[in-house]
Image: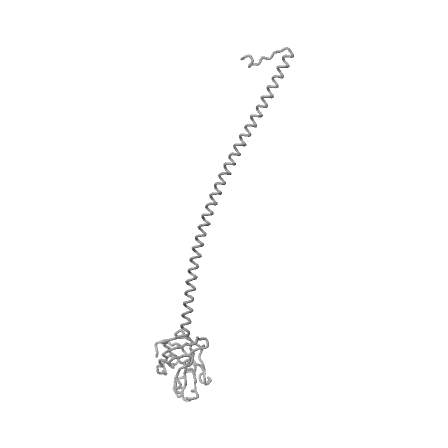
Amino acid sequence: MCNRKPSFRLEIDNFSEKEACIESPTFVSGGCEWYLFLYLKGDSLCDDHLSLYLSVANTQLLQSGWKRSINYYFIVVNQCHKELYRSSRLGGHLFCAENPSWGQRKFLPLEKYQEKGFLEKDRLIIQVYIDILEATDGKDLEVSRIKQRLQNIESGFVKNCLEFKSKEISLEKEESDTDASRIKKLEERVNNLELMISDDVNASRIQQQEERIKSLETMMSDLKVGLDMEKAKSCADGFFVVDHNDVLM
């Protein structure tokens, strides 16, 4: 039994009813996409063994020049995870556009199917273990240039942001100074208005006093005229009205 966790585990149910060739679902190992394909009864060059291959998936999406250098091996286990069969360790194989698949044409002798406990409940379980030695997605130089360009753009963006922020702070300071100047001018205008209002109030009071004085003077003048008329009337009637002011004089 292998204690290491497999890179992928393929369970084939109803094995005896399967077609001669099947493909596994795509799986990811070491950041790369893979799939298995099997010739259950051997391929055209070998009809007495199960042929098993590991292949790079979605190669049409990879950049020109991609490659994968790996070590790998296969193990057949039962439902209790007991190891039933193991391939040799396959190392140093280079997967690339010219050779996207590697494996073993003579992986498992077909006679193994007949052994007791090998296909429990008509199920075959295969595990694959992958060690990535090197993985390149191609056009590294172009990617490097693109990264450098992005770094330059980011650097320029940061610089522009700092300059803009500096100008914004400067404008805020100028606006603050302008606002302070405006506030000072408004305060001066308010003070002037208060003085004008105070002057208007004082002028109004003075005008009221002057009007009262004029009214009193008019009343005194009317009284004097009335007294003079009374004097004249008294003299005409033979009476003499004594004016205290005349006596004192």
Q: Residue 47 lies in what quarter of the image?
A: bottom left
- Residue 127, image x and y in percent? 39, 79
In the image, 35 versus 108, the foreground residue is: 35
- Residue 92, image x and y in percent? 35, 80
Q: Residue at x 40, y 87 (%)?
A: 49
Q: How many marks?
A: 0
| Image quadrant occupied by the C terminus | top right
Q: Residue furthest right?
A: 237
In the image, 136 versus 74, the foreground residue is: 136
In the image, 180 versus 152, the foreground residue is: 152
Q: Residue 125 lies in what quarter of the image?
A: bottom left
In the image, 143 versus 9, the foreground residue is: 143
- Residue 163, image x and y in percent? 43, 57
Q: Residue furthest top?
A: 238
Q: Where 209 sits versus 246, above or below?
A: below
| Colour pattern of the rendering | one colour
Q: Where 180 sits versus 219, above or below?
A: below
- Residue 135, image x and y in percent? 39, 75
| Image quadrant occupied by the N terminus | bottom left
